[in-house]
Image (cartoon, rainbow, N blue to C red):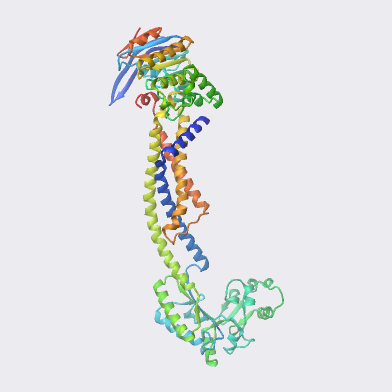
Amino acid sequence: MKYSLERALFNYTQNLKKTYWVIVQLIVGCAVIACCLNYSISSGERYIELMSHIEPNQYRIDAYVKNINADNDYPAICYSDYIELSALVEDADLSYIAYGVTLTEKLFYLVFADSCHYTKLGLTDNDCIYVGESVARFCGDEPCFLTTFCKLENDSIVLDNAAFSWEAFPAETEEKIVVEDLYSRNTLLIERCILIPAHLINHTMETSEEMLVTGLTFKIPDDTDIARIREIKERICLFLSDRHGDFEFAASGEQTSEIQSRMNDMKINYDSFLWISVFLMIIVALGTIGNALIILLKRKRSLVISLAVGATPRQLFLEFFCEVFLTIQTGILLGIIISIFVTPQLSDTFCVVKNHVFTWLIMITGGALTAFLVSAVSCLLFRTEPSRTIHGI
Amino acid sequence: MIEMVNVKKDYRLNGQNIPVLNDVNLRIDDGEFCAIIGRSGCGKTTLLNILGFMDSLTSGLYKFDGLDVSRTTAKEAAGFRQNKTGYIFQSFNLINGLTALENVAMPLGYAGVAKKHRTERAFELLMRVGLEQKIHSPVQKLSGGEQQRVAIARALAASPRVVLADEPTGNLDEENRDIVMNLLSDIHNAGMTIIMVTHDMELTRYAGRVLRMREGAIFE
């Protein structure tokens, strides 16, 4: 057994010295396969990365006023914006959703970043909740603050006390006292909540000329065509920019486009990758079998001589198998290493995951298994008696 | 030591049985130098292959050291080739790329002998055949006569019971032929059983016993 391994290692080093062409074919094949895998994986990982920032199946356009105190007739998004934008929405024939509540329910979500906003609506501190950043910090990542812990029942909001983490407030703060007070009453009147029904906005509109809000968020159903999203985004952007000047759009719309584009790319890549993979698998399988047979042919003489001088078939199987295995694995390994350097040069969308151990493991295991199977098949085919071959060498 | 009774060997070619050995009866004792002569195609090499466990017989009885070896598995045959017989080929059949020493040590390697011991043994045998200066030479760089001497050393490596030589001088010139035959004669004189197949009548003078083969049968 030990001698067979010794012989296999010797033959393998001879292969490396002399028959480098045996592995060249594998290097190329494996490099291309590795590139394709890398491309696929990197596309997938990029997609996952994008999706982690955005809720699945929802496209968003976020619009924020850049400077709330700007000296402008319309310093921030106001109710009139809403009216105008509603018209745009209807005109665009898109079903917009404002934080999960459709416009048909006449609900509109307003985010107050400062108490001055709702005072401009004609609401007082007694009627409305100020949820500034200091409170928001303790309420999780959602920018909609208390709505996370509320549910709408008719015209009132029922607070879910259990969901709110009072322990999150480290000390007695003004905000905490306000919020505690609100929660102590358990139920809020709708006028006192940041979630304001459209009819109330209309009512407020009658008493207060302008409503001042800092931002709008449109959620667009995922079956909406990307071109339509772009179109309506442009229209909204144009409208708000003309009106407010210093206006900023968040990137979620861009992310949406990128995701859509990436998904389309991935579909194309996946289809082409599938075909390329099948094609390459055939080439590599043939190459592997070819290499095994070449090695078998090259070693046939020595194997038969070894058989004649007393080697057992098992010893020869091991010798041949190890040689084929080592040679093919060298090709695969070199192919993978080359692919690490080759892949990024092929396209800027390629993102090689150099430390993607799992991928390499699959590839190496796959290569090893292929080599094993091919070697085994070749060895099974190699069923000969020494006398028949030795004189015909 | 070797006994064959009514041994037959057929090869199958294109659906037809081609008889090669026909009722071969043979008995070779320990320490004999036996030459088997005959024309090409009469079955000499086939007989030698069967004697050397490199081929199987179709029917009949083959006894080696009193043991019936007519039907052996591949593993058993390998064991016999390893321990009982040493084979010398007409075309030397050395492994190119290996040195003379490595070629001679090869059967011992497959027999599981440790590297140190097999190297010592190979060196000893190469000295015996007069190639101590060429032990580290790749065999492909040796002359025909030297290669055959390496092959003889290899055949003796595992201390076999019998050495089988198939036209050992077939590829050699006259000078090397004499060297090789004298070497085989020395080995025989040291007590080794040798069975040699040849079509060269001149070589029979080295043998103590000559068997003639004609159309697959043996005649004393």
Q: Which residue lies furthest to the right in this view?
A: A172
Which quadrant is the C terminus of chain B positioned in?
top left
- Residue occupying the point 51% across, 54% down: A354
Front one among A234 and A305: A305
Residue A1, visible in the rendered structure = no
The answer to whether B107 is drawn above or below residue A186 in the figure is above
Front one among B77 and B194: B194
* Residue A364 screen position, x and y as percent: 48, 46
Residue A323, visible in the rendered structure = yes
The answer to whether A336 is drawn above or below residue B218 in the figure is below
The answer to whether A97 is drawn above or below residue B46 in the figure is below
* Residue A324 screen position, x and y as percent: 44, 38
The answer to whether A107 is drawn above or below residue A33 in the figure is below
Front one among A369 and A162: A369
- Residue occupying the point 38% across, 50% down: A278
Q: Is residue B137 left or right of residue A160?
A: left
* Residue A256 screen position, x and y as percent: 46, 70
- Quarter of the view holding residue A267: bottom left
- Residue occupying the point 46% across, 39% down: A325
**Total marks in image:** 0
* Residue A287 screen position, x and y as percent: 38, 43
- Residue occupying the point 55% across, 91% down: A208
